[in-house]
């Protein structure tokens, strides 16, 4: 009898300065290796997006963060697709020339990659993105006109969009603190100032409409700097970060709910379609060891899912799973994590691969109250 597919989730929280995954697609190499030892890898845009660069992983599912949290909690399921018709929403605040560059990128994905990108919608008001940074160093943001975004997304869906790419005009760094943060990021030493606000935008669309969504910021091109870190370089080689978003959304799984679950009027109920994926099918989740407070990790840590905490992927946070009552398998690197997953999939206890295999001991007597 064939074993069920081995399914892993890989999470790298957005906007927390992750040493791996906090820059321009620099978690992609780790995702590629993890995908090679599992049947299905569920991950999110922060891991897969590399601005101008991307890498197609046939067994990876590109799932926006809010949707991933709903999936991990067992509220939503994932339905793999062969393709999506991708809607494109552009912020009215984007200048004419910069808008033209983004449209060229979208048209290039039609012509070069064969993606099904629909005609675009411009919001009826500037979205008004503002950027914020917490004392911890983590970033977030707000929208002055969220209703404008939702009206544009609804218009794109009425035209047949099954997934949504959003491009909002982000403020160019002007004050000294933001410029310093940007320079540190470009040198591979800081936090991505725009990442937290990007998550706010995609969360809003997914929560409201229940469709896959990802965001690409529109920013003025930066002057050439030969000192830019390779980890940030993917964002330096073009006028737009849109290509990876469109490529990811073109195969992003659709969200479904269980019969009788009325979480969203836009989500279809699943009636046991054989290809649907639910949280109880997840075998392992990988997460930075210091960033275990997210919804997906907390939900899956309460199940039989193996939680693998990667110490080398440091962040600005200090939220280990042990502080929240969880019991992860602690590893130093993604290379070690891949070995743990391979052993788990093979049904081999990792300690049996070392020279130190302990004797069995009797269980302690139950302590009665």
Image: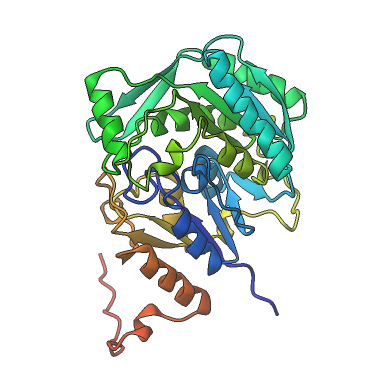
Residue 354 lies, in percent from the top left, at: 32, 85
Instruction: Look at the image and tell me whether residue 259 can be seen.
Output: no
| Residue located 61% across and 21% down the image | 100
Q: How is the image coloured?
A: rainbow
| Residue located 37% across and 48% down the image | 230
| Residue located 48% across and 74% down the image | 342
Question: Which residue is most to the top?
Answer: 125
Please state if 10 lies on the left or on the right of 83 as rendered: left
Please state if 146 lies on the left or on the right of 350 as rendered: right
| 23, above or below 193, in the image | below
Residue 262 lies, in percent from the top left, at: 66, 34
Residue 244 lies, in percent from the top left, at: 56, 41
Query: Where, quadrant-wise, is the C terminus in this rendering?
Result: bottom left
Query: Where, quadrant-wise, is the N terminus in this rendering?
Result: bottom right
| Residue located 37% across and 28% down the image | 223
| 36, above or below 311, in the image | below
Instruction: Look at the image and tell me whether residue 153 can be seen.
Output: yes
Task: Decide which of 231, 236 is in the foreground and name it.
Answer: 236
Task: Decide which of 52, 351 is in the foreground and name it.
Answer: 52
Please state if 244 lies on the left or on the right of 117 as rendered: left
Q: State the image quarter where residue 141 is shown.
A: top left
| 299, above or below 96, in the image | below
Total count of labels: 0
Task: Decide which of 155, 345 is in the foreground and name it.
Answer: 155
Task: Decide which of 299, 78 is in the foreground and name it.
Answer: 78
Residue 140 lies, in percent from the top left, at: 37, 28
């Amino acid at each position: 009898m064939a074993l069920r597919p081995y399914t892993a989730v890989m999470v790298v929280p957005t906007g927390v300065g992750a040493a791996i995954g906090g820059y321009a697609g620099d978690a992609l190499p780790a995702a590629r290796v993890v995908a090679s030892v599992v049947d299905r890898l569920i991950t999110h845009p922060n891991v897969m997006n590399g601005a101008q660069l991307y890498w197609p992983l046939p067994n990876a599912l590109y799932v926006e963060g809010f949707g991933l949290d709903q999936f991990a909690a067992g509220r939503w399921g994932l339905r793999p697709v062969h393709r999506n018709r991708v809607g494109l929403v552009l912020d009215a605040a984007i200048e004419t020339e910069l808008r033209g560059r983004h449209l060229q990128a979208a048209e290039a994905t039609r012509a070069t990659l064969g993606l099904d990108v629909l005609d675009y919608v411009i919001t009826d008001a500037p979205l008004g993105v503002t950027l914020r940074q917490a004392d911890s160093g983590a970033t977030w943001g707000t929208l002055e006109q969220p209703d404008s975004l939702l009206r544009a997304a609804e218009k794109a869906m009425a035209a047949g969009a099954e997934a949504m790419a959003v491009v909002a005009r982000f403020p160019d760094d002007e004050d000294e603190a933001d410029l310093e943060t940007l320079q540190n990021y470009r040198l591979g030493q800081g936090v991505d100032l725009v990442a937290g606000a990007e998550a706010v935008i995609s969360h809003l669309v997914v929560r409201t409409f229940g469709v896959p969504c990802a965001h690409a910021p529109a920013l003025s091109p930066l002057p050439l700097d030969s000192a830019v870190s390779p980890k940030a370089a993917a964002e330096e080689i073009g006028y737009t970060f849109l290509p990876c978003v469109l490529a990811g959304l073109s195969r992003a799984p659709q969200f479904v709910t269980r019969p009788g679950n009325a979480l969203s009027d836009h989500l279809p109920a699943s009636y046991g379609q054989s290809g649907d994926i639910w949280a109880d099918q997840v075998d392992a989740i990988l997460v930075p060891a210091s960033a275990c407070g997210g919804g997906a990790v907390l939900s899956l840590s309460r199940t039989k899912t193996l939680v693998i905490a990667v110490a080398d992927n440091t962040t600005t946070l200090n939220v280990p799973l042990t502080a929240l009552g969880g019991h992860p398998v602690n590893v130093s690197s993604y290379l070690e994590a891949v070995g743990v997953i391979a052993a788990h999939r093979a049904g081999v206890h990792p300690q049996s691969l070392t020279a130190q295999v302990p004797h069995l001991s009797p269980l302690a007597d139950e302590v009665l109250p």
